Image (tube, grey):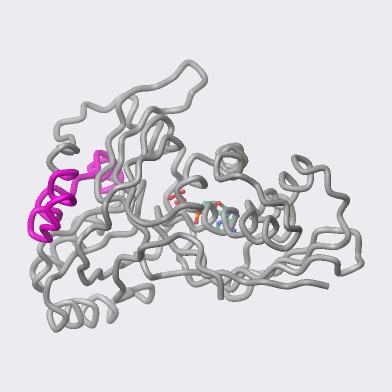
Amino acid sequence: MKQAAVKAHAKINLTLDVTGKRPDGYHDVCMVMQSIGVHDVVTVSVGTGSGEISLHTVGSDLPSDNRNLAYRAAELFLKETGITCDGISITIEKHIPVAAGLAGGSTNAAAVLVLLDQLYDTQLSMEKRMEMGCKLGADVPFCIAGGTMLAEGIGEKLTKLPDAPQMHVVLCKPPFAVSTPAIYRAIDSAEIAVRPDTVAMLRAIEAGSAAEVSQYLCNVMQPITAELHPEVTQICDTMKANGALNAIMSGSGPSVFGLFDDRDKAERACAVLAKQYEETFLTDFSCAGQINL
Ligand code: ATP
């Protein structure tokens, strides 16, 4: 039996724009994605002898069959490589809030692909890993690569950017889930009043300016989710009242993050929000997606 583990990082969106809808129902997006320190730990063992895929989650009651994206990643890996299953055991130690706009499922799936490639020594090219990732979900390719990236197409066309300037990140997930498909449906009939200035964000990252990266944070989904859940706006306001350079929602929400250039202020904001919201984290930007343990 062979075993390996990775830290599977969550992501936030520094920008998120929806630029069109395709005939197949997928949306064209343009977003600057950033890995953060908050992560799950994914451990995979191969050659367990069971002849089956088994999955176990610690810290969450996610399904352990093929409704779990990590399970589907293992199925896809076996199908695409033609390897006969000699028993694969997956354990996910869950820390990333679920259905939160943080790509929790996608990063677990990315971790399983990366670990199976290592354990079976299949030496998949980056292109092949990305192609397999895309079959599982539009955010999976980003989660394989990690760091700071521009994502276009349905999210799968990635351009590596310089690492964003390091800042303190306060992440807060209010206690309700948001359905990503429902928010996409709502955006189809919505008038988008404010869109991100992606070019300005790319310039800010290139220049390493924390103030400008903060200034250009923008997510077109925020007004839609915030109308359903006003707490999203309240959390942003609390972050800013406690010294955040800026604060927005990540993905389709409901997670909100604030960026801080001062550690003390970030700690204070985190303490204020943690009194009300259990899932509050003080974290930072991470330069990678899947880090071997
Ligand atoms: P994204 O930002 O990519 O839209 P998200 O952070 O909003 O993702 P997830 O945490 O990935 O959302 O969860 C979305 C749905 O996927 C949930 O309803 C959950 O039940 C399901 N799911 C399947 N597998 C997983 C997994 N391994 N981890 C988390 N959620 C999973």
Q: Is residue 215 magenta?
A: yes
Using the image, determine if residue 153 lies above or below residue 97: above
Residue found at x 14% / y 54%: 213
- Secondary structure mostly taken by the magenta-highlighted segment of the chain: helix
Q: Locate residue 146: give its quadrant.
A: bottom left
Asked whether 184 or 3 is in front, the reply is 3
Range of residues picked out in magenta? 201-227
Q: Quick check: 186 above or below 91?
A: above
Q: Residue at x 19, y 44 (%)?
A: 202
Q: Residue at x 60, y 44 (%)?
A: 125
Of residues 89 and 288, which is closer to you in this image?
288
Residue 203 coordinates in the image, percent (x, y): 13, 44
Residue 182 in the image: x percent, y percent?
Answer: 43, 38
Q: Is residue 112 left or right of residue 193?
A: right
Q: Image quadrant for the N terminus?
A: bottom right
> Quick check: 185 left or right of 54?
left
Q: Where is residue 120 drawn, in percent x and y?
A: 76, 58
Residue 268 lies in magenta, yes or no? no
